[in-house]
Amino acid sequence: MYVKTTSRKTKSGTVRYLHLAHNTWDASAGRSVPKLLYGFGREDQLDTDAVRRLVGSLSKLLDPAAALAATAEASTELDFVESRPFGGAYLLDHLWQRLELPRIVASLGTRGRGRPRNVEATERVLFALVANRALAPSSKLAAAEWVNHDVHIDGLDRIDDDACYRSMDWLHQIREKLEQRVFDSAAHLLNLEVDLLFFDTTSTYFELEDADLPVARDEHGLPLPETGDGDGDGGSKGGFRTWGKSKDSRDDLPQIVIGMAVTRDGIPVRVWCWPGNTADSALIRQVKDEMRDWTLSKIVWVADRGFASAANRR
């Protein structure tokens, strides 16, 4: 279908009329001929409001990008470039702002070794990685492509996987301070009650043929300073991914142990990771000690019987 113009000569001059038409095959003539479907009236007396309503009604049959592209093709003043989703990232960014994460990240980026040259840009990259994890979980390389082509994030035009890895390296350095300050902000914002905490662990396995090489670790599962740790890229330096009792029934694969403490309303307070062969009964003491460092010492802990060793009961 298309808009066809016809003309008629009058005493005052030539008058043009607009019609909605489409071509049909005329077998007797052996050619296509236009068939008028609707008349819009005289061009100089066109009801533009009626045309706008018609275009709007037809546009509802298309997705927003296709509708914009269709109207752009009909205009010599507008070129359609691209369309990106914004709603999910917009909502997450406002939650990010309410938790004061830009301020927290900026305060942690003003000192210490390995601090980024541009803290504001690093904060945007970290937000992009969080948004990717929430909206379209993928690898760091795929996350960069997602930011560059599939979503709009305020303050961030383009990134590459190197920027993602650099931001993650710095995030690991500031992890403990960041966790505490984010909890303080969330506790204030949500008026959290932390007199009762629920704690449990799970395990997650890795599709690897061999476990990481073992290293000497302290009672918290952290590598001793003289041993170093792996980079987490599939090598065998860290001794973190190792054999253990799998809660996924995959004792044949290396694993790590993950623990989480949540409030009575299910709001996460803190997350821990340990080598895959760490027993539940050894974890609760570390968890209580570290939460005491956050001035959360008068707490009732709820955990299953796997944590109820004789030492823990004492």
Image: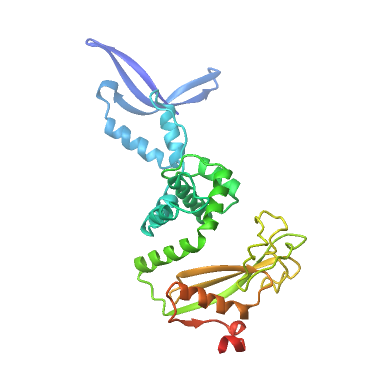
The answer to whether 97 appears left or right of 254 in the picture is: left
Q: Position of residue 37 (x, y in %)?
A: 40, 29
- Work out whether residue 255 or residue 50 is closer to the camera in this orientation and state it: 255
Relative to 44, 244 lies left or right: right
Q: Quadrant of residue 38?
A: top left
* Residue closer to the observer: 226 or 65: 226
Number of numbered labels in the structure image: 0
Identify the residue shown where x is 34% and y is 27%. 39
Viewer-side residue, 6 vs 96 = 96
- Of the 4 image quadrants, the one containing the N terminus is top left
271 to the left or right of 73: right
Q: Considering depth in this image, is 222 or 5 the residue closer to the camera?
A: 222
Q: Residue at x 29, y 22 (%)?
A: 43
Q: Where does residue 245 sit, x and y in percent of width and height?
A: 70, 74
Image quadrant holding the C terminus, namely bottom right
Image position, residue 275 (x, y; %): 66, 68
Q: Position of residue 86 (x, y in %)?
A: 43, 46
